[in-house]
Amino acid sequence: MSGPLVLAIDIGTSSVRASVYDARMKALRAARVKYLWPVRTDGRVETAAARLEAIVKRTVDEALAGYRRPIHAVGIAAFWHSLLAVGADGRPLTPVLPWSDLRADRESERLREELQESSVHRRTGCRLHPSYWPARLQWFRRHEPRVFERAHRWVSFPELLERHWLARDGVSISQASGTGLMLQDTCVWDPRMLRACGISAAELSPIVDLDDAAELSPRLKRRWPSLSRARWLPAAGDGALNNVGAECTTRTRAAVMIGTSGAMRVLWEPRAGERVRTRFGLWRYRLDAKRVVAGGALSNGGNVREWILGLVGNGDPGVERRAEAMPPDSHGLTLLPFFAGTRSPDYLVHATATLTGLTLATRPEHLLRAGMEAVGYRFAAILDELRHTVQVREFVAAGGALERSAAWTQIISDIIGRPIRLSAPAELTSRGAAMIAFEQLGVSPPDLGTLDSGHVAQPDAGRGRVYAAARKRQASLMKNVRSLKAEV
């Protein structure tokens, strides 16, 4: 067998995957290692960089065990928004903070008082939210001033990995675009945001594009001989690569993803001279200098389902089946599914889950069904914002939770009133990383035709009307809860 091979590494927030692909996009080898983030009651979510790096190494070890064929390129997908500080010696001064760390909620509120958030959003594509770097940098500046002063660089986790493994001194446009510090139109650091954060551009990595080639260190070449001549691409945002893997790379096709969290994204290459702008409820990032990705992210997706099942479903395998078979909104419940706060489109830092309508007749399957529908209503809110930027005609289900649950896909299709196609291949983010690696090698993957092979959930108008009324009920509850909290 001849032809180039690539290794795709997918660093997610619940697992790390490593897969070897050939140019037909067939996975020849694959490994996956799951892990958990320690969560504290004060909103902190963090883990040691050394622990996460060891997990990535272990995953690559398992994928390449006994493998001797030379691999030509490595594409990396990594979760957006991670942050840690490193000293002058390159060693971490802080743990790794993922997007779900909310310790900087008060700092984001202060920034909104000091800065014009709409202007920040137009420039950087990001709101002033604790998931982004500005609020987090302010948190360290205020609560850990010694760390803030000692910090030589503020980096994302994949940057640290690439420094250790490749001696690369740079951050991809894609990862930089999710920090809240990059000017989206020119792909350079925003001087006004740097001043507001109390740092200089020298304390951040140079921004590079996906053509910035690097090779492994001699030590790691001995560990992984098949990678000794591989070209390593800078790590890109996992959401953008999920779109690539789902073949959602035009402005008329959106990826709908539910993993631990959820997202609705559109990725496209703007026309020459086009100025891309998004509504205030959406974010705007990049895959590279050419391609923009816009959409909304839900902090609550598959984690809502897992939380409810953990609470009421243990020992009863029929709960999911009964929930999926229920008529729309037949449970009498209204749920704000904000177990992990909320991002798009409302960006309510202190949002918590709220449930009304409980009676003695409420069953476990009612709770589960209400949770699935509640997440669907949040996708509808994102679509309301997204249609002002692009006119999406096709939707593709691009997340593990939807691949496993045709019923959930159908619920979302009925709620948004659009067909949703279940994408046939699994591990779409890993697949997208491989496709971009082949692109950098000058190899065009074959026309896989995967969008013609998946099941299509067609919306039902009758169910849609039921959901529309239920969605209004959720919006009313949300308004009432916000008013109540404002009074308190």
Image: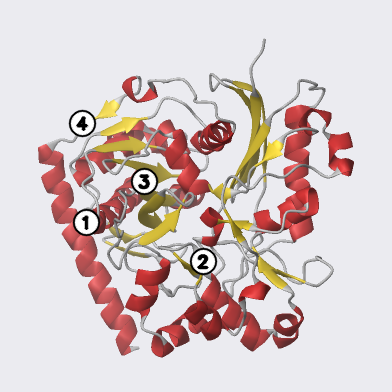
Viewer-nearest of discs 1 and 2: 2
Please report whichever mark, 4 or 1, sits nearer to the chain's N-terminal start.
1
Vertical side of 251 occupied by 317: above or below: above
Q: Is residue 89 visible?
A: yes
Which quadrant would the N terminus be assigned to in this image?
Answer: top right
From the top left corner, tell me how far across and down residue 73 is, in percent: 66, 33
Q: Is residue 358 left or right of residue 47?
A: left
Q: Nearer the viewer, residue 385 or 434?
A: 434
Please report whichever mark, 4 or 2, sits nearer to the chain's N-terminal start.
2
Q: Which residue is mark 4?
A: 458
Q: Which mark is residue 69?
A: none
Please report whichever mark, 2 or 3, sits nearer to the chain's N-terminal start.
2
Quarter of image, res 151: bottom right
Q: Which residue is mark 3?
A: 269
From the top left corner, tell me how far across and down residue 260 is, in percent: 49, 49
Q: Nearer the viewer, residue 221 or 459?
A: 221
Q: Is residue 361 visible?
A: no
Say which amino acid is labelled 3. Answer: Glu
Q: Residue at x 59, y 72 (%)?
A: 41
Please report whichever mark, 3 or 1, sits nearer to the chain's N-terminal start.
3
Q: SS at mark 1?
A: helix
